[in-house]
Image (spheres, rainbow, N blue to C red):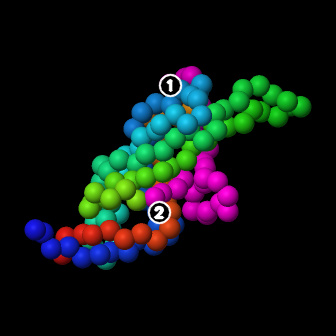
Amino acid sequence: MVPTTPVTIGDALHYRIALAEDVPAEAEEARPLRFTVLDPLKIDDKIVIAKGATVTGSIAQPGHKGKFLGMGGAKMSFQLERVDAVDGKKLNVRAAAGRRSEGATVRSFETGKGSKTKGLAAAQGTEYIGYINGEQTVAVRK
């Protein structure tokens, strides 16, 4: 058995992620999403979330086309749910630094202005920042 030591990850600690797949502009609410961690998250030189770890999320609010009184439609938003830690645990995560008092913390998709992203809410590889949702503990190798 490999000796481990507990490491506490603080609330709102951030890490870089990238969208693992294209998100169509007409994606429905609750559609599952996958992101990939771009850099390892370290605490005291110990990796707690590895580069390449999977982050799960979902569409929180579908986008709405059309204009009302000259204003654009609502942007599609997403929420983050879990990330794989090095010990196999699923850590709770969120999509913004601040926590909402009620409901999930959401973030709008970044939409490119080029023809390459036509018909997409966001393209594969688009980078975001994810945040740890509440203080959590991971067992890392000594």
The dominant secondary structure in magenta is: loop
Q: Is residue 110 left or right of residue 2?
A: right
Q: CA distance from mark 2 to mark 1?
A: 32 Å
Q: Residues within 10 Å of mark 1 (few under 14, many from 20)?
A: few
Q: Nearer the viewer, mark 2 or mark 1?
A: 2
Residue found at the far left of this picture? 1
Q: Earlier in the sequence, mark 2 or mark 1?
A: 1
Which quadrant does the C terminus fall into? bottom left
The image shows residue 106 at horizontal and vertical percentages of 61, 50
* Residue 121 located within the stretch drawn in magenta: no
Q: Quadrant of residue 71?
A: top right
What residue is rendered at 50% in x and 25% in y?
116
The image shows residue 49 at horizontal and vertical percentages of 32, 60
Q: Which residues are magenta?
A: 92-119
The image shows residue 67 at horizontal and vertical percentages of 81, 28
Identify the residue position indicated by label 2 in the image.
132
The image shows residue 119 at horizontal and vertical percentages of 57, 22
User: Does residue 16 lie above or below 41 as drawn?
Assistant: above
Q: Is residue 102 left or right of residue 111?
A: right
Q: Quadrant of residue 9?
A: bottom left
SS of the residue at dot 2?
strand
* Residue 93 located within the stretch drawn in magenta: yes
User: Does residue 17 lie above or below 142 as drawn?
Assistant: above
| Residue 142 in sight here | yes
The circle drawn on residue 116 is 1
